[in-house]
Image: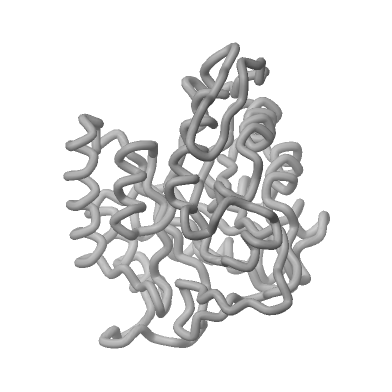
């Protein structure tokens, strides 16, 4: 099993020196993946409910470094770790610009980009950005995924779709990775699982939160559904990467009917949780160690590698 970390995008740690220290520290400690979240603006009034907290509130409203710019910065200060957009909200950005920016990051990182994508949850942010119709964001996302793949694998490339169209053009250079950077699909709704089966190279759900615990029994059932969808698409389920995200939301709140939040407690308990998900086929888990100051974040990252990771070998 591989491990990843969440990189700060807002708050006291979202400044160049802190980001540099955390990214370089992650590589030196052996973390395989650095994941970066995505928000562009935060309207002052937000009525949309965040799906991963019990009260529906989103933590940290007000500031965020732009995801793709941050990934490009991290590409220049790291050498080995994979860089994951976790997740990029597909309808927020023009798909041609997005294809070019992501290809550029893949080139500059020498082929270390993984494109994690989702459809979004904040209606007000869609409206502020002049993005596609929020209520059609799933269909828009499916079309934009097709555009990304076309731009990364064809030259010249053209598209005439329901939500976007362009005449033949060159969108070069292509990404380093062939046929294109891996695409991980976020979410665990039925629509998300269908999207994984149709478009994805991996499944990248959020779990281990009070509002979305995804315990092994539920996760196992979702994997079974994903396998059926993948088989229906005549794709190889076993070729998918299963990458589980465990962010720190609602700290201290235990989900109903659970004795504790997954991946919390003593090292042996955390290792037992990881082994249970590994047995189901999870390839990678990304943790949220972010806590100011930088030294505390680095200490938490090192503690996991020293005290938990050895118990899995």
Picture residue at 39% right of the left edge, 70% below the top: 208
Depth check: give the residue in front, 168 or 16: 168
The residue that appears at 70% across and 29% down in the rendered structure is 108
How many tags in the picture? 0
Give residue 161's position: percent from left, percent from top. 49, 32
Who is closer to the viewer here, 122 or 173?
A: 122
In the image: residue 272, left or right of residue 181: left
Question: In the rendered view, would you say 135 is above or below 145?
Answer: below
Position of residue 281 measured from the top left corner of the image (x, y, whole percent): 26, 49
- Residue 145, given in percent of the width and then of the height, sits at 48, 37
Nearest to the observer: residue 204 or residue 98:
98
Q: Is residue 247 left or right of residue 256?
A: right
In front of the other: 132 or 17: 132
215 sits to left or right of 167: left
Position above or below: 5 against 182: below
Residue 294 appears in the figure? no
Give me the residue at 34% from left, 56% from top.
312
Rendered view: 138 above or below 12? above
The colour mode here is one colour
**In this orientation, does residue 76 appear?**
yes
Residue 101, x across and y down, in percent: 69, 34
Left or right, 216 with reference to 297: left
Q: Residue at x 41, y 79 (%)?
A: 210
For residue 241, what is the image quadrant?
top left
């Amino acid at each position: 099993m591989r491990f990843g970390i969440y990189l700060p995008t807002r708050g006291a740690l979202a400044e160049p020196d802190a980001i540099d220290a955390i990214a370089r520290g992650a590589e030196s400690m052996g973390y395989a993946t650095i994941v970066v979240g995505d928000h562009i603006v935060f309207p002052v009034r937000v009525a949309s409910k965040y799906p991963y907290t019990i009260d529906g509130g989103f933590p940290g409203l007000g500031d965020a470094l732009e995801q793709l710019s941050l990934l490009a910065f991290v590409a220049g200060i790291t050498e080995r770790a994979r860089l994951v957009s976790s997740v990029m909200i597909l309808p927020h950005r023009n798909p041609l610009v997005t294809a070019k920016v992501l290809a550029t990051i893949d080139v500059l990182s020498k082929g270390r980009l993984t494109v994690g994508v989702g459809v979004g949850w904040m209606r007000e942010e869609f409206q502020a950005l002049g993005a596609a119709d929020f209520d059609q964001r799933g269909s828009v996302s499916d079309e934009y995924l097709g555009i990304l793949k076309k731009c990364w694998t064809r030259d010249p490339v053209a598209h005439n779709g329901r939500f976007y169209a362009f005449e033949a053009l060159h969108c070069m250079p292509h990404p380093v990775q062939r046929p294109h950077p891996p695409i991980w699909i976020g979410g665990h709704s039925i629509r998300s699982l269908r999207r994984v089966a149709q478009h994805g190279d991996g499944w990248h759900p959020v779990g281990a939160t009070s509002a979305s615990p995804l315990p092994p029994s539920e996760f196992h059932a979702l994997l079974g559904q994903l396998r059926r969808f993948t088989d229906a698409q005549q794709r190889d389920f076993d070729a998918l990467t299963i990458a589980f995200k465990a962010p720190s939301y609602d700290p201290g709140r235990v989900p109903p009917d659970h004795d504790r939040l997954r991946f919390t407690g003593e090292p042996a308990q955390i290792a037992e949780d990881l082994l249970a998900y590994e047995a189901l086929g999870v390839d990678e888990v990304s943790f949220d160690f972010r806590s100011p100051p930088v030294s505390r974040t680095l200490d938490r990252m090192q503690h996991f590698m020293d005290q938990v990771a050895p118990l899995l070998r």
